[in-house]
Image (tube, helix red, strand yellow):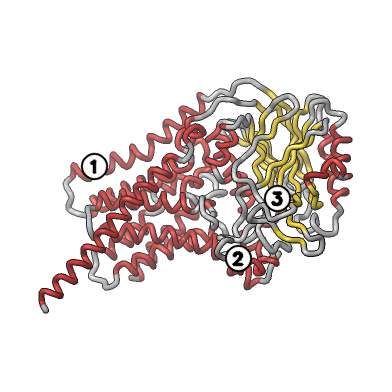
Amino acid sequence: MKQNYLLALCSAFLLWLAWPPIPFTALILLVGMVPVLLAIENIITSDYKNKGRLVFRASFLCFVVWNTACIYWVINSLTAVMPTLMAAFVSIIPFGLGSLLMAIAFWLYYRLRLITTKTLSYAGLICFWIAYEYLHQTWDLAFPWMNLGNGFAQSHYLIQWYEYTGVYGGTFWVLMSNILVFETYLAFKSNDSQKRRYTLAGRSVVHAVLPIIVSVIIYFNYTEASNPANVVVVQPNIDPYEKFGSLPTSAQIERLVHLSDSIGQTNTEFFIWPETAISQDTEEKNIRLEPNFVAVQNFLSKYKNGNLISGIESFTLYDNEKTKTARFDEQNRHFFDVFNAAILIENSAKVQFYHKSKLVPGVEQVPFADYLGFIKPWFAAFGGSSGSYGKQDEPSVFYSQSGIGVAPVICYESIWGEYVGDYVKKGAQFIAIITNDGWWGNTSGKDQHLQYAKLRAIETRRWVARSANTGISAFINQRGDITQQTEWWVPTALKADINLNEVLTFYVKHGDYLALAGSTGSGIFGIWLLSAAFFRKKNIVVARNGKN
């Protein structure tokens, strides 16, 4: 059994080696699961007892090591705002929960092997895995950071066909390639016929190489239609812990204005500031009376078509409890919602707000609050929040004075392909990502987050203008190329003439259809497993009664 655990660890190492931000290694994903598949095959064909338990242990070992090695940086942000023990507990969500769901997919594959052919079992494994990824992006504990399709973000020229499939196409590619390579290995190891050996080898090569060829052709033949707009992104480099404490919001805005003015042009359409750039709690209804709002409008007055997109900490007051996330202020006797929001300010009285929808579990929202409301006090250490932030259920597009539509995507939301695609369906001509990646420190987290933004550019064929508080800010074109980027922890600003786009890709039109298909298949295989278990139990009971 030790050999099987070593094989599982080998897969963990290969998957880590292939993951961003390590460059030029993404294709290792196409073979990275072969060792753990071999470990599971060894268990299935052995005379071990409790094979299901051993399959689960081997696969969980692989995936928990891989997940922890890739997203170790999560605990950096948690230990900064809560006791170490609490941080370790909350980190179970990204480290352990995803790994658990991955291991369950492999355990269900083992259960299928007991009742059907290997081919159908492989189909079940693919469906179970895709269903896990879809679940892990839709429920209250969502953390789709480690979806297999994200692994090609560093090598975006390999997956230009994401404009048709989204990241789930990459997940299918990885799983199917690993299965074919594994079967080829078994064929050459056994006494299979020469024809079967070379047929499997040929299929493995074609399945790996054909998507690359298609992608490279798309990449070099893709041409952007000329429709320029001048955009400025600002990186103020304000310590994320200082910005809510010792540094006044007015001083932060002065720095942002200075950096914006340093490269702004008379034809600049958008200035983009990072998440929570306006860090003072601001009542949305009275925003026009706020000194910070007046300062921004004074800055914009010199830019005829200028618009500012900025992150803002905002709140709304209610006479009664209008939303599930509303909190009660006992001193002033009213309800209120707090938002991690984006705001668009222009040279008029018009103001547009967007409330972040994809909230970070445990930090910005209490998971399953309807059932676990009693744990709200546990989260008081999370920046002083004793409940969930308010949110809106659907994305909304900001429109400039000249009619340009832009998607205001806040931080964590940028890893949801279909959600970003919904902005585009509603009229967004480019994507503005505002984030505050300094919480993680100078780790691979900030680099992964930047690389994932390239996937959104390819899926939607929209430019991405990314403003990060401490780094990395960037411009990404419609092919996913990073055309400009800043360094980490450097105050600066970038400008570019980006091309707006109104064409909808196949993926934008149809969303995560592969995820829905995989989840449907998972349901069918799941019902089959339950039926088999039911009839097996019934037959055992009948057999026992017959003996009696």
Q: Amino acid at mark 1?
A: Tyr
Q: Which residue is mark 2?
A: 373
Which quadrant of the figure has residue 262? top right
Foreground label between 2 and 1: 2
Q: Which residue is mark 1?
A: 198
For marks 2 and 3, give the CA distance. Answer: 21 Å
Residue 253 picture location, percent across and down = 84, 45
Residue drawn at x 65%, y 56% is: 325
> Badge 3, how many Cα within 10 Å: few under 14, some, many 20+?
many
> Badge 1, how many Cα within 10 Å: few under 14, some, many 20+?
some
Q: Is residue 454 visible?
A: yes
Residue 129 picture location, percent across and down = 40, 52
Q: Is residue 258 visible?
A: no
Q: Amino acid at mark 2?
A: Gly
Q: SS at mark 3?
A: strand
Kindly check if marks 3 and 1 are in contact, taking CB atoms under 8 A apart as contact. Answer: no
Residue 417: which disc? none
Question: For the N terminus, which image quadrant?
Answer: bottom left
Residue drawn at x 63%, y 20% is: 226
Comparing 240 with 401, the one in front is 401
Comparing 32 with 236, the one in front is 236
Foreground label between 2 and 3: 2
Q: SS at mark 2?
A: helix
For marks 3 and 1, give the CA distance. Answer: 56 Å
Q: Which residue is mark 3?
A: 340
Q: Amino acid at mark 3?
A: Asn
Report the number of discs: 3
Please, which residue is most extreme toward the top here? Answer: 226
Q: SS at mark 1?
A: helix
Kindly check if marks 2 and 3 are in contact, taking CB atoms under 8 A apart as contact. Answer: no
Residue drawn at x 79%, y 26% is: 305
